[in-house]
Image: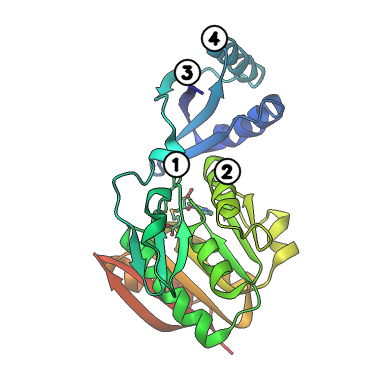
Amino acid sequence: MTQTRLHFITSKEEAERIFAGLEAAFEDDGWPIAVLEVDEDRDIHEVSLYADGDIDEAEGRLREVLRSLSVDRPVEREELPDIDWVARSLEGLQPVRAGRFFVHGSHDRDQRRDGDIAIEIEAGLAFGTGHHGTTAGCLEMLEQVVEAEHPANALDLGTGSAVLAIALAKLSGIPVLATDIDPVATEVAAGNVRLNGVAGHVEAVTATGFDHPVFAERGPFALIVANILAGPLIEIAPQMAAHVRPGGSLVLSGILDRQHDAVVEAYVAQGFSHIATLHREGWVTIHLKPAA
Ligand code: SAH
């Protein structure tokens, strides 16, 4: 099915209002809506509605919602290629080994070896094929932490393709909450969770901040892994401290070598101790523990 992305640029404050309006208006269509921060300093945000079917009608309805919110922004269209993203995502990519994990697409199922913890990923529109140094670093560090600590539950914040959540569920069989701010990612995540037979363990939820009720319902967490970026990781340090169990662990990634110290400092300020750092391709993965 052909999908069209209807998108426009707006401010953060306006984007939040528009997101709520669009969610209500397009709830029955089930069309993903995403807000992307383009430039934080200049307050440029992009809102996207992934529509299908009659695009003129969809755009008309979108404009109607914008009018009702007194928003006047030029709406642009992007035809998303009519290809099976799901099947294409890992095509041509080699499978990845990280610790005991073997991350592969459907075309490499026969390369699994005995003893592998195999994770089949169709990344589609979500990040997380295992090829990025941050994902591979997280996989390795998660294996070590799970083996040492046997956590009772986990949170995968910024789950993308759900690769890390699936890894945790397969490794330890614990309940994992997998969240993402991007509803498209959450959809891809839920698909991969089913594909890997761990739907009984992993719950994929779209959540923009820790005020979403699911964190209080499922938390606190014995293990939190977050492969997002240094900036947001520093910002959310206080909330991470509030949601990790005493004696638990944080595994943070998406951090460049030169951002390492700033991230560690932000977490030390929240009472965390730095346990270990893993370096991969210019990126670091950091293990932290809350003070006893
Ligand atoms: N966990 C996967 C994907 C990492 S990509 C892996 O390790 O390969 C980072 C993901 O985090 C993206 O899907 C992005 O939408 C999401 N994200 C970014 N900031 C976030 C935040 N503050 N809270 C939750 N998710 C966030």
> Which residue appears farthest toward the left when viewing the image?
281
| Horizontal and vertical percent position of residue 149 | 56, 85
Q: Earlier in the sequence, mark 4 or mark 2?
A: 4
Within-10-Å neighbours for mark 2: few <14, some 14–19, many 20+: many
* Secondary element at tag 2: helix
In what element is the residue under mark 4? helix
At 47% from the left edge and 18% from the top edge, which residue is drawn? 75
* Disc 3 residue lies near ligand 1 with CB under 8 A: no
> Are circles 4 and 2 on residues that touch, CB within 8 Å?
no
**Image height check: is 269 above or below 247?**
above
Residue situated in front as seen by the camera: 55 or 244: 55
Foreground disc of the pair 2, 3? 2
Chain-order first, disc 3 or disc 4: 4
Secondary structure state at the residue bearing disc 3: loop
Res 269 label: none
Residue where numbered disc 3 is placed: 75
Residue under label 2 = 187
Q: Badge 4: how crowded within 10 Å, few (<14), some, or many (20+)?
A: few
Q: CA distance from mark 4 to mark 2?
A: 25 Å
Q: Residue at x 39, y 69 (%)?
A: 113
Which quadrant of the rendered structure holds the C terminus?
bottom right
Residue on which disc 4 sits:
56
The mark nearer the N terminus, 2 or 1, is 1
